[in-house]
């Protein structure tokens, strides 16, 4: 296939809590005329982003759980891209482009590598660009401690700087200089709650294989990589509703103690006497929630919370959350 007839693919990356899902949701809501297939990856055994993402008939959202997209589920990425191709060719599914949102712990290099290592995928899909969202509030610490955060910046064709309203102007400039030292190729622009021109994200033909090879000469070599074993995820589920006041007090207390090690936490909450699900998200010391869609009268109401962090005391979290559940009426 020629470049004009190939399906463009955007890899959306960024460290845990940077705002990737917010940006993706904004892209899906905009009236831009693009039909988009979305491939979602969660680091953990349960994903909740399908509840957070706007669902629309024009989008095909595929979620892959329990692993980093650049490790254990890379074969799933090839398989899903192949299945999307078959459905598109058969007329069963219509989409113009694909967006892959990687887990915040992913090194985007092996994800991009997929489009050069697999011949069938490389002939059908065109890797358009790697977009990296950087959290201005927590980037300095993340870049110091995690190789993945540095890789995400290094591979970027565009860097979107989120949460700049939470830091001072000198801190923003200092971070920009650091990002430029890591990756002088990628323009850095501020983004507020995902608001950025679509033309700056899609069809920019920003991925340049030669530039990537300069960054990492072994890019096309098959290799494995390891994650920080101190980073892990766990999931809490319950069909019993939460007492909202107790839950807020418990989480506030845990954040005070473990906040620096709570890289990302999010979920969908079933609260007592609330007809709506509540979408809950946080990163380090920052936490917030919004009303989601109403619970359907026929559906099972269940809270699902995912925590990703360093050496978090899972048993203590689980016991505390259980104590926040409302007493049976």
Image (spheres, grey):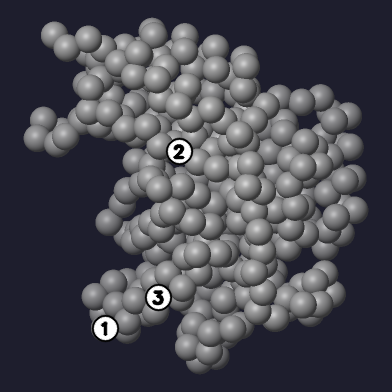
Residue 128 visible in the shown view? no
Q: Which picture quadrant has residue 82? A: bottom left
Q: Which mark is residue 20?
A: none
Of tags 2 and 1, which is closer to the observer? 2
**Residue at (67% x, 27% y) in the render:** 260
Q: Distance between the residues labelled 1 and 3?
A: 17 Å
Q: Residues within 10 Å of mark 2 (few under 14, many from 20)?
A: some
Screen quadrant of the C terminus = top left
Q: Residue 79 carries which label?
A: 3
Of tags 1 and 3, which is closer to the observer? 3
The residue under label 2 is 234
Closer to the camera in the image, 209 or 217: 217
Q: How far apart are marks 2 and 1 (CA)?
A: 39 Å
Q: Residues within 10 Å of mark 1 (few under 14, many from 20)?
A: few
Residue 143 is situated, as x and y percent measured from the top left of the image, at: 78, 44
| Local SS, label 3 | helix
Residue 7 is situated, as x and y percent measured from the top left of the image, at: 48, 77
**Residue at (36% x, 60% y) in the render:** 62
| Local SS, label 2 | strand
Q: Distance between the residues labelled 3 and 2?
A: 26 Å
Q: Residue 90 carries which label?
A: 1
Residue 124 to residue 207: above or below: below
Q: Which picture quadrant has residue 308? A: top right
Of tags 3 and 2, which is closer to the observer? 2
Left or right, residue 218 beside residue 277:
right
**Residue at (55% x, 43% y) in the render:** 232
**Residue at (32% x, 32% y) in the render:** 237
């Amino acid at each position: 296939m020629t470049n004009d007839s190939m399906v463009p693919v955007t890899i959306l990356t960024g460290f845990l809590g940077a705002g990737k899902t917010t940006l993706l949701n904004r892209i899906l809501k905009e009236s831009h005329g693009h039909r988009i297939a979305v491939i979602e990856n969660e680091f953990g055994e349960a994903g909740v982003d399908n509840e957070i993402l706007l669902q629309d008939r024009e989008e095909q959202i595929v979620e892959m759980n329990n692993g980093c997209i650049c490790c254990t589920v890379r074969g799933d990425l090839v398989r899903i891209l192949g299945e999307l191709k078959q459905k598109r060719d058969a007329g069963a599914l219509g989409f113009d482009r694909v967006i892959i949102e990687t887990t915040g712990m992913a090194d985007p290099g092996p994800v991009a590598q997929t489009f050069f290592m697999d011949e069938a995928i490389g002939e059908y899909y065109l890797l358009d660009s790697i977009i990296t969202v950087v959290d201005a509030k927590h980037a300095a610490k993340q870049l110091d401690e995690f190789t993945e955060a540095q890789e995400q910046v290094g591979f970027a064709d565009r860097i979107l700087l989120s949460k700049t309203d939470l830091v001072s102007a000198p801190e923003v400039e200092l971070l920009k200089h650091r990002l430029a030292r890591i990756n002088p190729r990628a323009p850095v622009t501020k983004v507020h709650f995902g608001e950025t021109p679509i033309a700056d994200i899609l069809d920019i033909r920003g991925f340049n294989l030669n530039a990537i090879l300069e960054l990492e000469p072994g890019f096309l070599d098959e290799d494995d990589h390891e994650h920080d074993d101190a980073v892990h995820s766990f999931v809490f589920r319950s069909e019993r509703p939460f007492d909202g006041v107790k839950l807020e007090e418990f989480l506030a207390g845990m954040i005070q103690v473990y906040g620096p090690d709570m890289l990302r936490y999010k979920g969908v909450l079933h609260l007592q006497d609330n007809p709506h699900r509540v979408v809950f998200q946080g990163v380090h010391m920052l936490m917030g929630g919004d009303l989601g869609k109403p619970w359907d009268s026929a559906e099972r109401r269940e809270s699902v919370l995912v925590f990703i962090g360093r050496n978090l005391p899972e048993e203590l979290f689980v016991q505390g959350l259980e104590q926040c559940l409302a007493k049976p009426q």
